Amino acid sequence: MPDLLISSGQILLGLVGLIIGGDLLVRGASKLAAAAKISPLVIGITVVSFGTSAPELAVTVQAAHAGAPELAVGNVVGSNIANMLLILGVAALIAPLAVQSRIVRVDLPMIFGAAVALWLMALDGAISWLDGAVLFAALAGYLVWSVKQGSGEQADVQQEFADAADRKTRQPEGGKAMRLAKQVFLLVVGLIILVIAARSMVAGSTEIARHFGVSDLVIGLTVVAIGTSLPELVASVVASWRGQADIAVGNVVGSNLFNILAVLGIGAMVAPDGIPVSRDALHLDTPIMIAVTFACLPVFFTGCRINRAEGAVLVGYFIAYTTYVVMGATDASYTRSFEIAMLGFVVPMTVLAIGYSVYQSMRLRRAKSNC
């Protein structure tokens, strides 16, 4: 019992540290990006999303070195599922989220392609050093393209954001230098806290998993995944509350892409023998992540927004998925009945609802084009 209390304390301290470290990292990086006059969508997709994904990176790298590969993979897969279902759902419940056409046309399909590529790479049972290098190179290309796209925005949008940034950063040169130094300091402190917190969380969660006979994969898909997704949740909810839908949606989209391409990419490159992928992660959880991403395509497409009803559906599916993972880990007797209910009723009804929404959206667009 004392060991369990210590492990629980490690997880709690790790969660708190991840939140504090992620907040410091995001604050420092966001203000530096604002000084560079980058658009809100690009900030959400790059700086904010990468900053809030730093906990996933720290946990995955630490888990890979600690010999807990299932925790490393489960953390990324579970975080991506939580991002798409829980975070977007909660943010949409607060305020409907407008979705820019770029996300529908480019970013979401790219996440889907990255998820499929990850699954194909893992078919041999591991994400090798070469696989990790390919994933990370894809991220570098995406970053270069995103920055170029951001610099080619319409002049009025660019100027409006530039004016806002100037009002926040206009001060004497000496003061500006001190301000930049402060943001760099926040970045460094945030990164240090994240690394320490990640080590604490990995140690505590792994010990509890072994004590109860629960696999590292399940712990990674639930406790650790939700814990490391808290920075994304806070950032997106606050952005939604303030009416900054670009940052709210861009944060989730960029975070999911960063998790696959950078977190697993770097993790595979620094791990001695790559990252092994378990049979459950390959045959169940990763395909679920792919399916969730694919299902979000029509949700984003309908009116280029996520309304409150769709947000409620997303949250409901996250609760159902988490329930299923926990039941599977505890060998609950009613797991099979739950599967039948989901596959036989809930999923078909959701597909029909999404199909109807797409049909209505296409009719509305066709009617407008004929006016």
Image (cartoon, grey):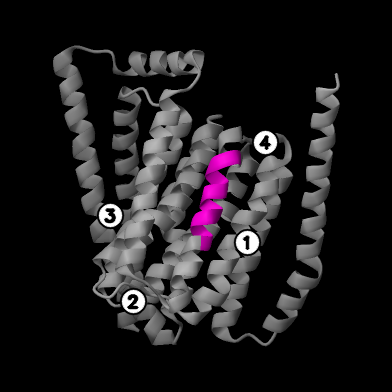
Q: Which x, y percent locates residue 355?
A: 80, 50
Side of 289 where 34 appears, left or right: left
At label 2, which amino acid type do we have? Ala
Q: Is residue 136 above or below residue 277?
A: above
Residue at mark 3 to residue at mark 4: CA–CA distance: 35 Å
| Magenta-colored stretch includes residue 328 | no
Mark 3 touches mark 2? (CB < 8 Å): no
**Which residue in the structure is indicated by mark 4?**
304
**Which residue in the structure is indicated by mark 3?**
194
Q: Which mark is residue 291?
A: 1
Nearer to us in this view, 297 or 310? 297
Kindly report which numbered mark, 1 or 3, lies closer to the viewer in this rendering: 1
Q: Main secondary structure of the magenta part?
A: helix
Tell me which label, 4 or 2, sits earlier in the chain.
Answer: 2
Q: Is residue 142 above or below residue 210?
A: above
Badge 2 density bin: few <14, some 14–19, many ≥20, Cα 10 Å: many
Is disc 1 placed on a helix, strand or loop? Answer: helix
Badge 1 density bin: few <14, some 14–19, many ≥20, Cα 10 Å: some
At label 1, which amino acid type do we have? Ala
**Which residue in the structure is indicated by mark 2?**
68
Magenta segment boundaries in residue numbering: 105-116
